[in-house]
Amino acid sequence: MTAGHVLVAFGLAVLLAELLVAVLGCGGTTDVDHPAPVGGFTIAEAHRATQQHRECSPRECECVREAWRTLVLAGRCAPTGELHRMLYG
């Protein structure tokens, strides 16, 4: 493999990573603002958001916090004590 091939492979890896962040809406960092949708989530959207934001903490990510709240209120999951405190104070 030549140096040119390595640079092309690296460039493709960077583009793929950027695409994943754009599609999933989360780069795994908790410093980024991830607002929840204004109208809230449907149950399917909430499931998708918890998967897309699995690297985020409900304490720091409004999107995943609202998604968990939707799932708890719909009876789809029961929060642990810690998650309950994060969702409801």
Image (cartoon, rainbow, N blue to C red):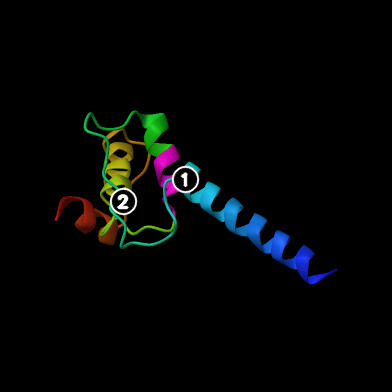
Farthest residue toward the bottom?
3
Which residue position holds label 2?
79
Where is residue 3 shown, x and y percent of the image? 78, 71
The picture quadrant where one finds residue 85 is bottom left
Determine whether, in the image, residue 29 is placed left or right of residue 38. right
Residue in the image at 60% along x and 51% along y: 16
Disc marking residue 6: none
In this view, 79 is above or below 40: below
Secondary element under disc 2, as helix, strand or loop, is loop
Which part of the image, by quadrant, shows the N terminus?
bottom right
Residue 28 magenta-highlighted: no
Disc 2: CA contacts within 10 A as few (<14), some (14-19) or many (>=20): some
Look at the image and give the residue range highlighted in magenta: 48-54
Determine whether, in the image, residue 70 is placed left or right of residue 88. right
Residue in the image at 26% along x and 45% along y: 35
The amino acid pointed to by label 2 is Pro
Residue 53 magenta-highlighted: yes
Farthest residue toward the right?
1
Between residue 9 and residue 48, name the one nearer to us.
Answer: 9
Disc marking residue 22: 1
Secondary element under disc 1, as helix, strand or loop, is helix
Determine whether, in the image, residue 1 is placed left or right of residue 66. right
Where is residue 51 shown, x and y percent of the image? 46, 46
Between residue 81 and residue 32, name the one nearer to us.
Answer: 32
Where is residue 27 shown, x and y percent of the image? 44, 56
The amino acid pointed to by label 1 is Ala
Farthest residue toward the front?
4
